[in-house]
Every structure is written in C-alpha cells, then in structure tokens.
Amino acid sequence: MKKQYCSICGQAMLEEFGNNAQPVNDGICCNNCNYTVVIPARIRLANRLKNNVKD
C-alpha cells in the first residue's frame, strides 16, 4: 500500500483510509488533524450558516 500523507500537517498517516479534510482543503487528513482542525472548522461553518438563516 502506498504511504499517504496528511494534507494539513504533512505527516505520514498511520490510518488506512484517512478522513475527508473539507472544509479545510480538498485532501485527506490524519485523525489528529481531523479532531483538532477539521471538525472545529465544520462546527464554526455550521454555526455561521445557522446564524445567517432567516426564519
């Protein structure tokens, strides 16, 4: 199997599949970046979208 690298931190990934790095970038990321960068970015984005929705 070809070694994969995280598109956020650049480290070699130990995970077999990686994680979707969107909305940070269009690549794949390691579990650590997923938990510390990607998920918080998704929550911020969802909160901004929620606050802009007019009921």
Image (spheres, rainbow, N blue to C red):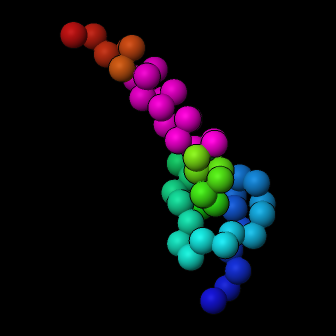
Q: Residue at x 71, y 52 (%)?
A: 8
Q: Position of residue 7 (x, y in %)?
A: 69, 58
Q: Residue at x 49, y 37 (%)?
A: 42
Give the camera-side residue of 22 and 31: 31
Q: Kindly give the residue lying farthest to the bottom in the view shown.
A: 1
Q: Is residue 40 magenta?
A: yes
**Horizontal relation, residue 48 to residue 1: left or right:** left
Specify the quadrant that holds the C terminus: top left
Relative height, residue 2 to residue 42 (above, below)? below
Q: Is residue 6 visible?
A: yes
Q: Kindly give the residue lying farthest to the left in the view shown.
A: 55
Relative height, residue 44 to residue 4 (above, below)? above
Q: Residue at x 53, y 72 (%)?
A: 17
Number of numbered discs overlaid on the protein picture: 0
Q: Residue at x 60, y 71 (%)?
A: 15
Q: Position of residue 1 (x, y in %)?
A: 63, 89
Q: For the stretch drawn in magenta, what is the main secondary structure? A: helix
| Rendering quarter of residue 9 | bottom right
Relative height, residue 14 to residue 34 (above, below)? below
Q: Is residue 5 magenta?
A: no
Q: Kindly give the residue lying farthest to the top in the view shown.
A: 55
| Rendering quarter of residue 54 | top left
| Rendering quarter of residue 29 | bottom right
Q: Is residue 27 visible?
A: no
Give the camera-side residue of 19 and 27: 19
Span shown in magenta: 36-49
Q: Position of residue 11 (x, y in %)?
A: 78, 63
